[in-house]
Amino acid sequence: MKQALSHLAKFSCSAISYSAISYSAISCSTLLWVGFMAALPLTPIAMASEMLAQSQPQSRVRVAVLDFDYASTGADYWWYANPDAAKGVSDLLTNKLVNSGRYTMIERSRIADILAEQNLAAAGRIDSSTAAQIGRVLGADVVVIGSVTRFNLDEEGGGASILGFGGSGSRRTAEVELTARIVNTTTAEIVAAAEGSGSESEGSGRVSISIFGSAGRSANNDDELLSGAAEEAVTQLASQLTDAASKLSALPATLPTIDATVADVAGNTVIINRGTQDGFRSGMRLSIERVDREVLDPQTGEVLRTITTPIGQVELTEVDARSGVGRVVSGIGFQVGDKAKAVQ
């Protein structure tokens, strides 16, 4: 390598005019230096840095899927006959997004608890502003809200007789249509949308209709048809929402709106009393603050504001549902009872 570069340098130098000797000398020296550096292998430090960069896990967006609402203007009476359909659609979508490996999903039970606390469990349709508020409480980066625009069983073909006499074969088709919106919990902006539709058909034999209702049909079979159509629609939604993961990962991370309290201090390790269910996660930086005083409402005695002084920072290294473990980054003298506020 060095010999080849030396010949190349000499050739380059001899090809230029005498008036540019000084410049050519610099060019030749530079060429030799670049060639020499290129021939060197990566140093152990450089190799370690490169391997570390490749091994760093990609941060995943934290997503909460709320129960879908019903937005159809048609007479889809099957929806009203299946009160758990909204929960079923949301559960199915959550599972599919978990299996995609592109998102960190917030537990549906935790979402139900927050909705109950906020008195929103039976409020019906939730707009983007309310969804963003719920998401911030949950520590989610984005929230998925959706609507069922079609949920029904149609019967075509053949005839039906009165009082069970006559009638001919028919074909039943379950149809489910869904829409979903992804809401940024920081801005309440809808950052992505998706649509999905599914159908499931079955040909049946003789069906007789009584003046008192349906006869000869299997309720379980109806559920299977509707479930099959719903799964097809949800699969389409999940595929589109998974494709949006890269776009969503560029959004700024959402910080918890609730403060934690220091529960234990041992050397360089601090344990707080909040975890993933409140939006705290590994790698998050916390400001540890000493409580100076609490401002109380003179009429009710309620704490209106807590006055604190920052005394240092901690970086979370391990977080479970209800607690977090962090290492001290700066500051000393942390105590049980100090407040821990997420800052980045």
Image (cartoon, rainbow, N blue to C red):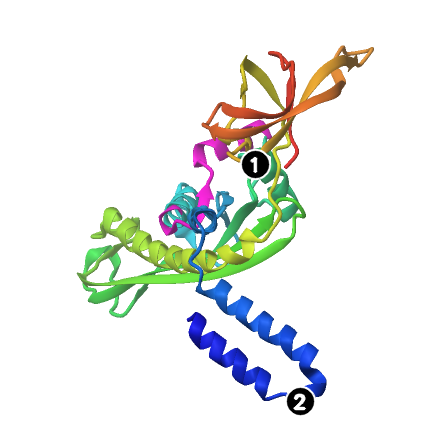
Question: In the depicted view, which residue is nearer to us: 35 or 272?
Answer: 35
Q: Main secondary structure of the magenta part?
A: helix
The tally of labels here is: 2
Going 53% across and 29% down the picture, which residue do you hit?
A: 316
Going 44% across and 32% down the picture, which residue do you hit?
A: 109
Q: Which residues are magenta?
A: 98-118
N-terminal of the pair, mark 1 or mark 2, is 2
Horizontal side of residue 290 vs 222, given as left or right: right
- Circle 1 packing at 10 Å, graded few (<14), some (14-19), many (20+), is many
On the question of residue 274 being in view, the answer is: yes
Asked if the residues shown at circle 1 and circle 2 are in contact, with their CB atoms under 8 angstroms apart, the answer is: no
Horizontal side of residue 200 vs 16, given as left or right: left
Q: Dot 2 corresponds to which residue?
A: 17
Q: Secondary structure at mark 2?
A: loop
Quadrant for the C terminus in the image = top right
Q: Quadrant of residue 228?
A: bottom left
Residue furthest left as drawn: 205
Q: Is residue 101 magenta?
A: yes
Q: Is residue 341 magenta?
A: no
Which three-letter amino acid code belongs to the residue tagged 1?
Gly
Label 1 and label 2: CA atoms lie apart by 70 Å
Question: In the depicted view, which residue is nearer to us: 298 or 164?
Answer: 298
Q: Dot 1 corresponds to which residue?
A: 139
Residue 23 position within the rendered picture, expressed as x and y whole percent measured from the top left: 68, 78
Q: Secondary structure at mark 1?
A: loop
Horizontal side of residue 303 vs 103, given as left or right: right
The label number, if any, that marks residue 74 in the structure image: none
Quadrant for the N terminus in the image = bottom left
Residue 55 position within the rendered picture, expressed as x and y whole percent measured from the top left: 42, 47
Choose mark 1 or mark 2, whichever is in front: 2
Which three-letter amino acid code belongs to the residue tagged 2?
Ser
